[in-house]
Image (cartoon, helix red, strand yellow):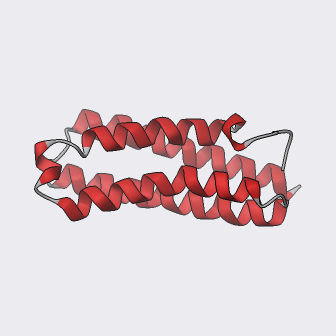
Amino acid sequence: MGKFSSFEEINSWQRARLLNKKIYLITDTDAFRKDFDLARQIRRCSVSISSNIAEGFERNTDKEFIQFLYIAKGSAAEVRSQLYLALDLNYISQQTFNELFAEVTEISRLLGGFIKYLNK
């Protein structure tokens, strides 16, 4: 479990929480309102990152925590994929794509490092 007393202390969870807010804000625009399915999917993927970090932490074993961190990492990949579609459909600008893509990629990197640490 590392040296954390709560999942709220975990940097990747904190970053995912900020990402969730940004995803919700961008999917509340007119472009996304016309595409309810994509808006819902990208929101669910984003929320899945922070939710799986929290749920895994509360399982109280490194083995289960690592499993949930892998799921969170997979959800981060889903967000990246959904961002490409949003860009391709001109729902978001290239700048917004770049910013969100960098954030979710950093979260994924943090999760990968955390998994390696816990596997030792």
Left or right position of 68 against 106: right
**Residue 72 percent coordinates (x, y):** 58, 58
**Residue 108 percent coordinates (x, y):** 56, 49
Left or right position of 68 against 64: left
Please tell me whether residue 37 is drawn above or below residue 22 in the rendered image.
Answer: below
Left or right position of 72 against 45: right
Residue in the picture at 89% in, 55% down: 120
Residue in front for this viewpoint, 113 or 37: 37
Instruction: Count numbered badges in the picture.
Output: 0
Residue in the picture at 59% in, 64% down: 71
**Residue 116 percent coordinates (x, y):** 77, 53
Residue in front for this viewpoint, 85 or 41: 41
**Residue 85 percent coordinates (x, y):** 24, 58
Residue in the picture at 53% in, 53% down: 49
Please tell me whether residue 32 is drawn above or below residue 64 in the rendered image.
Answer: above
